[in-house]
Image (cartoon, helix red, strand yellow):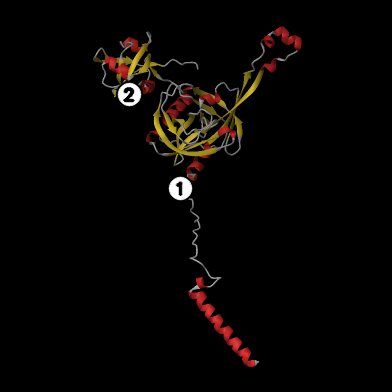
Amino acid sequence: MRRLCLIFAQTATISLAIIFVISTLKSNLLPWGRHGSVATIRVASEEYPTKASSYSGAAGKAMPSVVNIFTSKEVRVPQNPLLEDPFFRRFFGIPEQNRTRRSMSLGSGVIVSPEGYILTNHHVINAADEIEVALSDGRKSLARVVGSDPDTDLAVLKVDFQGLTPVTFGDSGKIRVGDVVLAIGNPFGVGETVTMGIVSALGRSHLGINTYENFIQTDAAINPGNSGGALIDAAGNLVGINTAIYSQSGGSLGIGFAIPVSLARNVMEQIIEKGVVTRGWIGVELQDISPQLANSFGLTDTQGALIAGVFREGPAYAAGIRPGDIVLGLGGGKVTDSSSLLNRIAELEPGKSTEVQVFRGGNRMDFKVMVGKRPRVNH
């Protein structure tokens, strides 16, 4: 019996030794051994996401400068003609206040100075009876309108707050098609939101949105409520004021437009300093030159702008410019189309003269025009 126990113990020991050797050198031969190699998992480091893949720094820098704007106004409720009759209203005791209701709308704005000035769109605050501004830190206050400019769809508000974080102005003249931009605003009233895209195009005009158009086009999602909000570059600097979208449904289709910060800043500073925006004016109506018009006038291309009309009391008429003339140059620079010419005239200082080169009857002619002040148009 003892001999059998000894043999069993020796056999078990040898077997365990063999299993140990196999499991160490050829574990895949055992039914419970490893099959294939061990999967190597990479764990994100503390620096993830990297600066190259994240725009949290830019967003965090600009978001405290973007505000939500809530406006309300009294609007007349359409009534049955019988309800407009004073006798009928008195007979049935219909109160006057039932003829109107409060209309609410949403928008966004950008804090531009620690004194409480806020830049937004004219259409956001137009005709509003009450304007409330909500900061990113939760503070709220009624705001007053410092001034607005319907021609560029810009307006300036003022709030009395301490400890504001004004936005950092960038240079819209340096942005290029393909640059990454972020749109910050309050779409549909859901709260402050950041969307990302690229600059799709520059110098967009002839859209029929504003009198003066030189838009930045972007595919960053811009929705109702984003109007007046910030378009920033990858460093968190303001490069545009979000203004409009192209949409058949009311939502974003990836075609949004922003006013360049260079134009917005010029308008803002004039509103703050003077209360109004002063622009140059020479008293002409302009039209683009189509290939058909170019051919009929004997031009080799469509560069320039056709004078479609001249105000008799205006500076251009006094200088000798007439309908049918084609403006080829202004102030020593070439003219490409009617929109760019209108923008350049607006930048001229009233009271100073400028050179205007026109094409008339096959000849080039130069006129010296005394720039006037553009009349204010009620929109």
Give the residue drawn at x 51%, y 24%: 122
x, y percent for residue 170: 42, 36
225 vs 145, nearest the viewer = 225
Indicate which disc residue 31 carries. none
In the rendered image, residue 253, in percent from the top left (x then y), is placed at 49, 33
Task: Report whether 378 appears left or right of 316.
Answer: right
Q: Quadrant of residue 351?
A: top left
Position above or below: 320 against 61:
above
Residue at 43% across, 32% down: 217
Q: Residues within 10 Å of mark 2 (few under 14, many from 20)?
A: some
**Res 266 → quadrant:** top left
Which residue sits furthest left?
363
How many circles with numbers are drawn on the protein?
2
Residue that mark 2 sits on: 336
284 with respect to 363 (left or right): right
Q: Residue furthest top?
A: 87
Q: Residue at x 42, y 25 (%)?
A: 213
Of residue 353 and residue 126, the one placed in the foreground of this image is 126
Query: Is label 2 in a helix, a strand or a loop?
Result: loop
Q: Amino acid at mark 1?
A: Ser
Q: Is residue 190 visible?
A: yes
Mark positioned earlier in the residue sequence (2 or 1)? 1
Q: Amino acid at mark 2?
A: Thr
The correct choice, above or below, for 78 with respect to 190 in the image is: above
Residue 252, x across and y down, in percent: 51, 33
Residue at left 61%, top 31%?
141
Q: Which residue is mark 1?
A: 53
Residue closest to the eye, 31 or 306: 31
